[in-house]
Image (cartoon, rainbow, N blue to C red):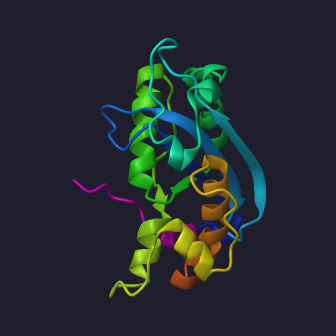
């Protein structure tokens, strides 16, 4: 018999980046909240990520994520941050809001730093929410979903705050879809 969704551990991840292009931009911050299918929080962690080049780098839209160059200068290197993330992902199911975006940046950073991240069978809360609204009557942005489910989003575009919010939304989506066992959970198939 398949494991119950309520017993499954989910690593809800969010990244803040220096821009939207995986080819030109990089990860600035990672946030992770490990929860079970009922939404009970088991662990929370976040870290800024030091740039590869300490002399010249861009942090991108500071007005959106609030991260400044001085913030990341003293941050741990990507290899250290990704090693910690790999430990948190072990034995969990990867979840993110717009998972393809976060996964693409994390894959790039992991490959560059020789770290293996377990992100097989990911779940995307954006896709799960859209599937509940086939006629697209609602917004599926994280902030709007939080408002719909009466979840307080403290600091939008902070990796840990967004991971907290996504982790709080996840049980609502799992329940709305009627998922009871892990075998029923969909697998994110990346768009081409």
Which of the 4 image quadrants contains residue 170?
Answer: bottom right
| Residue at position x 70%, y 61% in the image | 154
Residue 2 vs residue 13, the one in the foreground: 13
Q: Is residue 108 above or below residue 40?
A: above
Check if residue 183 falls in the magenta segment.
Answer: yes
Residue 26 vs residue 91, the one in the foreground: 26
Number of marks in the rendered image: 0
Q: Residue furthest top?
A: 55
Q: Is residue 99 rendered to the left or right of residue 173?
A: left
Which of the 4 image quadrants contains residue 35?
Answer: bottom right
Q: Is residue 41 rendered to the left or right of residue 144?
A: right
**Residue 87 visible to an observer of this rendering:** no
Quarter of the image that includes the N terminus: bottom right
The location of residue 74, given as percent across then percent down, is 67, 20
Q: Is residue 139 above or below residue 8?
A: below
| Residue at position x 53%, y 66% in the image | 142
Which of the 4 image quadrants contains residue 138?
Answer: bottom left
The prevailing secondary structure element of the residues shown in magenta is loop
Magenta segment = 182-192
| Residue at position x 51%, y 82% in the image | 177
Q: Is residue 129 above or below residue 160?
A: below
| Residue at position x 70%, y 69% in the image | 152
Residue 183 vs residue 42, the one in the foreground: 42
The location of residue 114, given as percent across then percent down, is 47, 21
Q: Is residue 137 rendered to the left or right of residue 8?
A: left
The location of residue 182, given as percent across then percent down, is 56, 67
Q: Residue furthest left?
A: 192
Check if residue 103 falls in the magenta segment.
Answer: no
**Residue 68 visible to an observer of this rendering:** yes
């Amino acid at each position: 018999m398949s494991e119950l969704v309520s017993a499954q551990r989910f690593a809800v991840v969010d990244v803040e980046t220096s821009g939207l292009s995986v080819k030109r931009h990089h990860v600035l911050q990672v946030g992770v909240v490990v929860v079970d299918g009922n939404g009970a929080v088991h662990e929370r962690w976040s870290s800024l990520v030091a740039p590869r080049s300490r002399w010249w780098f861009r942090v991108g839209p500071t007005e959106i994520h609030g991260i400044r160059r001085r913030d990341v200068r003293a941050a741990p290197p990507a290899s250290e941050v990704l090693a910690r993330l790999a430990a948190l992902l072990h034995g969990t199911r990867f979840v993110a809001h717009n998972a393809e975006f976060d996964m693409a940046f994390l894959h790039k950073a992991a490959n560059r730093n020789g770290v293996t991240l377990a992100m097989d069978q990911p779940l995307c809360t954006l896709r799960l929410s859209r599937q509940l609204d086939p006629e697209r009557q609602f917004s599926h942005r994280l902030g709007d979903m939080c408002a719909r489910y009466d979840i307080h989003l403290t600091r939008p575009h902070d990796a840990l705050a967004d991971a907290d919010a996504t982790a709080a939304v996840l049980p609502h989506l799992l329940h709305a879809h009627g998922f009871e066992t892990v075998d029923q959970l969909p697998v994110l198939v990346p768009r081409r």
